[in-house]
Image (cartoon, rainbow, N blue to C red):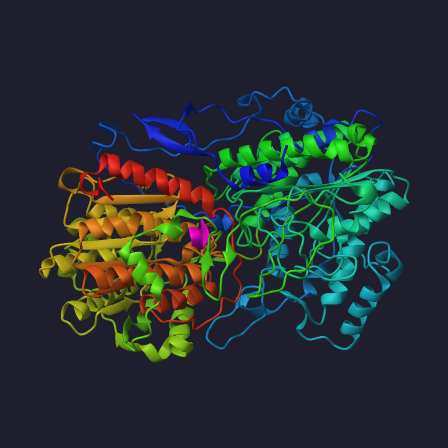
Amino acid sequence: MDKRVITNLMEERRWVEVTNNGRRTTENVFTGSVVRHCPRRLFSLLTLALACVEEGRSRSLSAAPYNACLCSTRYRVASRLRRKTRSTDFHQREAAPRKTVRRHPSPTDHPMASSSVAATAAEPGPHAAGEKVAAAAVFWHEGMLAHDAGRGVFGRGLDPGFLDVLDHHPENADRVRNMVSILRRGPIARFLSWHSGRPAHAAELLSFHSAEYIEELVQADSAGANNKKICECTFLNPGSWDAALLAAGTTLSAMKHILDGHAKIAYALVRPPGHHAQPDRADGYCFLNNAGLAVKLALDSGRRRVAVVDIDVHYGNGTAEGFYHTDSVLTISLHMKHGSWGPSHPQSGLVDETGEGRGLGYNLNIPLPNGSGDAGYEYAMNELVFDPNGRQCLTMDGYRKIGQIMRGMADQHSNGQILIVQEGGYHITYSAYCLHATLEGVLNLQAPLLDDPLGFYPDDEKYTMQAVDIIKKCWKESIPQRGPPEFRSYTAHAYLVNFQRCEPARTHGAPEEEDSRSRVKTSTNRPTRSGKGNVTVAASPMESSASSSAAVAAEGAPATGEQLAVFWHEGMVAHDAGRGVFDSGHDPGFLDVLDQHPENADRVRNMVSILRRGPIARFISWHSGRPAHAAELLSFHSAEYIEELVQANAVGAKKLCEGTFLNPGSWGAALLAAGTTLSAMKHILDGHAKIAYALVRPPGHHAQPDRADGYCFLNNAGLAVKLALDSGRRKVAVVDIDVHYGNGTAEGFYHTDSVLTISLHMKHGSWGPSHPQSGSVDEIGEGRGLGYNLNIPLPNGSGDAGYEYAMNELVVPAIEKFRPELLVFVVGQDSSTFDPNGRQCLTMDGYRKIGQIMRGMADQHSNGQILIVQEGGYHISYSAYCLHATLEGVLNLQAPLLDDPIAYYPEDEKYTMKVVDIMKKCWKESIPFLKDI
């Protein structure tokens, strides 16, 4: 098969979920054919690589789990709401409220349940028959906590001087403290035995690393390195080298424990991580390649073949580099499809990087689409063979299943021997839970010992399954013919599974190195950066858009010098949403370090500071906010609901719904947020400014007329829209780019044709009983409002180009037809690349472009008047940068004032474009005033 065809197929998601007379179906976007949903298949990609194994038996196996975790992906909310059943011409039927169904994958759900490895993994462990479960040996040393990776903007160690609060480096000690504590205090504790680690010796390091590189690290440490930047995002501080030696030595001790027959299952709980460390350089938070050293020890001890299975969300380039030319080690990496990370490792983990020389065919890469989730990973494991830093949406169920599959392969091929090596996992609490679930799976425990405290189940696994099938076909057609003949009867002696780590950032204009490795020649037709601050997509339909508003935005008119009126009040920082596991407010007692609630004051402090001290400061005038009055609140909210909040405040504290807590100071902050937004709107209505920005918290777009929801108490934007209507404006349009569906605003205007609500959001489905509506394309309003609620659910990882395409193809034409007298721009930076609550991968460039498009529409339709209302955005530092870029765009400043400090550029916008085209067709056919857009 032509490898260009394979690559092009992998770049395109061919199936899109649509609704046909109430039935969920899957439509081929190329042919238009429709097929009914079928059960998810259970087949293992990893099994394919090892299925050929018919000669010999393996002696040991190693596994480890999780940076692909969902954790911060999700925005879970659940109070109690019932929405009336809504009839729409779109379905020509009564649309029942959607319900979230928690799916627990089972081998019996899939046609391939008879697969030998899948069956082995699914069998209950020996404890099911009353026998004792074998303990796993955990190797750990407290000294590894001494490594301090520093603070800055994300992992960059950069303090630009614009922010009040800097990030902890993602690879910090707290994440591992919680892993230790959950294993010691969680229900799995009775199955574990603890062993002390040790530092590695110099001679041991030379089995994988060059003497020159080790000498470089030793010299840097002896010179008293203080925040010495070894490479992008990787810093050597006092204590770092000792911790790296302990991580390497502890992993070697765990491997030797297995080799000497003391245990079949051992887990090296180590930091700093290692799988990016190459033989001659550090990379991606990694100094020494812990797993690579362990593999070398196994080979030196007489094991002839070792398999490394790496499920870290990022490509294990260092391990692959170390064994790229040998046929004694099979390296398999399941990772996010992220492309090259720059000159430190130009290889990108593509399917065509298959090894070289004797190693040709023994390096297998499985790049998976953003949002693959539990079902996608399970399918990849079974067919071919898992955070703030990842976009793969795995939950505890997914990690548990992967652990079971690894255990099944160990039992089948390596006499049950498996070494688990810790790599990444950067959500401080949820990573620990996912580790617990992984070890449950590896120990083959019959029932989950811990429930998932926060996970939901994404919907994008179908694309992942198609990508997996294409990879499988590529392997079958290219590797057996070109690789050594014994590949067909390959038997693994050990499986090493490393897990996850954070991605080093790509710098602007970083030169790309020529990679001399053997590759199948491909034509990826990926988006390219064209000049500073612009993203272009080759041969994209976007380029031919004739939209006048898009043209206005693209021209980049010179800066006018006009002032942006920013409304803010310091009292809003008094709202304390608490601590717990993510946003749950729950302390299970298993963890040493709890999360600060995502909606915390630090994120807004940084937004204020970057606007005061950043380069946009000269374009801003500051205005003080004020609390809202009770009568003002009643324009959007019910009197009963307001009374409920007043009573809760009088009591002192209350959980209003899942993730939403009223604490002392919360009600005062909510009143300030509402009143400040109203003041900003009145500033525009009175003619004092054309552009005003309400910098407010707590956020508001989930708050419904009669209840709180999703961190929101009062609907700030909804109240402002009501004020505009009451002041004589006949038509107001709301464009909401927060990563989550603005269900509260939609609810408030669902029956009116005077407000057009448009929401671009992550396709997350219903969030529970608090709002059974899911933000799907078929929820279009009711009564007079039929057709005036437009939802644009976008696939995970849509990125800058995907969002720009959706804005130009859907939002701009809809606004042109509606012709509003005022625009309300609801902004949430949780659509950004590194936000803990989203997976849409927008960068500063994307926000800047969206701001320009909004400004173009305002100039064309509302005499330039636009109110900007702050909603989400939960990455403490990057949200502030994305806000700065958004306001640059709205002000139509000609050149970017700030470079993007950390962003990389995703590759999944083609699927988004196809989804947008289908939604556009749907609108034209079902919504009267949009029939000729």
Task: Give the camera-side residue of 407 and 684.
Answer: 684
Q: Position of residue 729 (x, y in %)?
A: 12, 59
Instruction: Please give left or right for residue 120 compared with residue 870 in the image.
Output: right
Instruction: Please give left or right for residue 115 compared with residue 932 in the image.
Output: right
Relative to 94, residue 550 above or below: below
Q: Position of residue 303 (x, y in %)?
A: 87, 39
What residue appears at the point 63 percent right and 38 percent down from the top-left corner?
3
Q: Position of residue 870 (x, y in %)?
A: 32, 62
Task: Give the camera-side residue of 532 and 77.
Answer: 532
Could you tell me how many numbered marks the image carries? Answer: 0
Quarter of the picture holding the N terminus: top right
Instruction: Please give left or right for residue 749 compared with residue 773 in the image.
Output: left
Q: Is residue 526 magenta?
A: no
Q: Picture quarter containing residue 515?
A: bottom right
Task: Give the camera-side residue of 128 and 568.
Answer: 568
Residue reaching furthest bottom? 618
Instruction: Please give left or right for residue 737 compared with residue 354 in the image.
Output: left
Quarter of the picture holding the C terminus: top left
- The segment highlighted magenta reads 796-801
Q: Is residue 707 visible?
A: no
What residue appears at the point 32 percent right and 66 percent down from the top-left corner?
890
Q: Position of residue 156 (x, y in %)?
A: 58, 67
Q: Is residue 786 visible?
A: yes
Relative to 697, residue 295 above or below: above
